[in-house]
Amino acid sequence: MNKLQDWKERLKKGHMLSVICVLLIIVVALGIILYKKQKEYRQTSENSYNMAFYELVDYVQNVETYLAKSLISSTSEHGAETLTNLWREANLAQSYLARLPIESQELENTEKFLNQVSDYSYSLSRKNIYNEDLSEEDLKNLKELHSYSVELENTLNQLSEDLNTGRFSWGELTKKGTIAFAQQVDNISKESFSNLEENFHEYSGLIYDGAFSEHLTSNEKKGLTGEDIEEEKAKQIAEDFVGKDNIKEISNLGFSENATIPVYDFSITNHNNETMNLSISKKGGHIVSMNANREVNSEIISQEEADQKGKAFLESKGFKNMKETYYLKQEGIVTINYAATQNDVVIYPDLIKVKVALDNGEVLGVETTGYLNNHIQRDVSHINITKEEAKKSLNKDLQIESEGLAVIPTEWKTEILCYEFKGKVVDREFLVYINADNGREEDILIITNTPNGTLTM
């Protein structure tokens, strides 16, 4: 009897132990699930804050750009457009600033600044719309706002670098609070986040492709001349373009029917086992793009030599009267924008990009989309005002460095013949375009010179 009771007691204890083990397993499993959910939530929040921050950086950059343009705009029409864009970008910057996990008092100065830019630019745009000129006081205020925008932009760039290198994270901020974040920033920038506008480091944003390169597409394809060709003919054109003696093997990669320009694609291997891809248009058999894969480990030739190498290459391929405009260097390769010229008039829509290796001047890439979309002979004789008359439309503070005629595209897919004036206001370089027919200010671009290129925005 005692043995039976002892056996029952053991069985009971074993059952309880099993229940406890099952419960422990469930608790551990739930803990793991909750941990994963919390980790996913933190990652989602971190990504959301990162997105808001980088959007804020972009919109503040746009605010600075439009403020700079507003300082030298001298016509009410273009001034109204610039100030309206400024009002929009400042509002969007405010929107993304509000999404950051920082208490409002820590961002009070930044919020005030963006709000002031938004309200003031809106009121000034109304003046321009009604053909009222901006007063000296208005321009003085815009100049002051621009100075603050540069400082804000520069500090955001420093914070962006610190975020990228892990010196702070939004997760730590939400856990430790705004004071902890301010202390982190204090160690980085020697000032607290609440005094953001008082400590700024230079921030610069660039548009890669240069002046007017966003207007490269056209439904009409004016430069795409000739009859349709078959794939075998396209292959022959690709071989001739590269030079048959340079080809070890050529492969057909198919027909890209839905591309902006329908093309036959080919892959070519040279005798050094280096590969390049070429695209030949079905209509007319034009070279649309060529891109070679080769590592460049040194920079020996100068930018001027690279410009001449690219220009000579284009001439040898039938692209005459091209002029180098803007460029960008990356990893030993310079990408140069060449615009067509006609009677010394720069035709910006007819753009070709050429990649030149800086170790030996070899052309590693060509892209002719802008040229094939737009190239035709223009009538560049319709000029109703003189250059001197056009200069009267310029801001009086612009120190002119060069001048000439240029055809520029518009967002409505049209073109305008303009006087192009390159000059400086303080330490910023600008391109100002004055309509050669009516003297109206059509566009303003900011030139940014960096060690890696001359670019515009």
Image (spheres, rainbow, N blue to C red):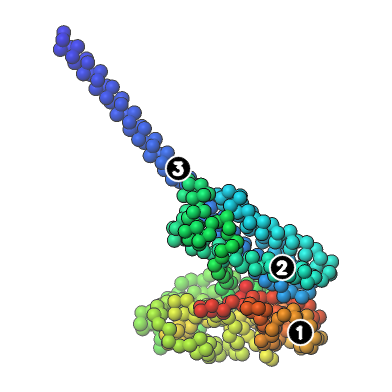
- Amino acid at pointer 3: Gln
CA distance separating discs 3 and 1? 63 Å
298 to the left or right of 203: left
Answer above or below: position of 292 versus 158.
below
Q: Which residue is mark 3?
A: 38
Check disc 2: other Cα within 10 Å, few if <14, some if 14-19, many if 20+: many
322 to the left or right of 8: right
109 to the left or right of 174: right
The residue sitting at 73% across, 84% down in the picture is 419
Circles 2 and 3: CB atoms closer than 8 Å: no
SS for tag 3? helix
Answer above or below: position of 152 versus 171.
below
Check disc 1: other Cα within 10 Å, few if <14, some if 14-19, many if 20+: some
- Amino acid at pointer 2: Leu
Circle nearer the N terminus (2, 1): 2
Tag on residue 391? 1
Tag on residue 142? 2
Q: Is residue 215 visible?
A: yes
- Amino acid at pointer 1: Lys
The residue sitting at 48% across, 61% down in the picture is 188
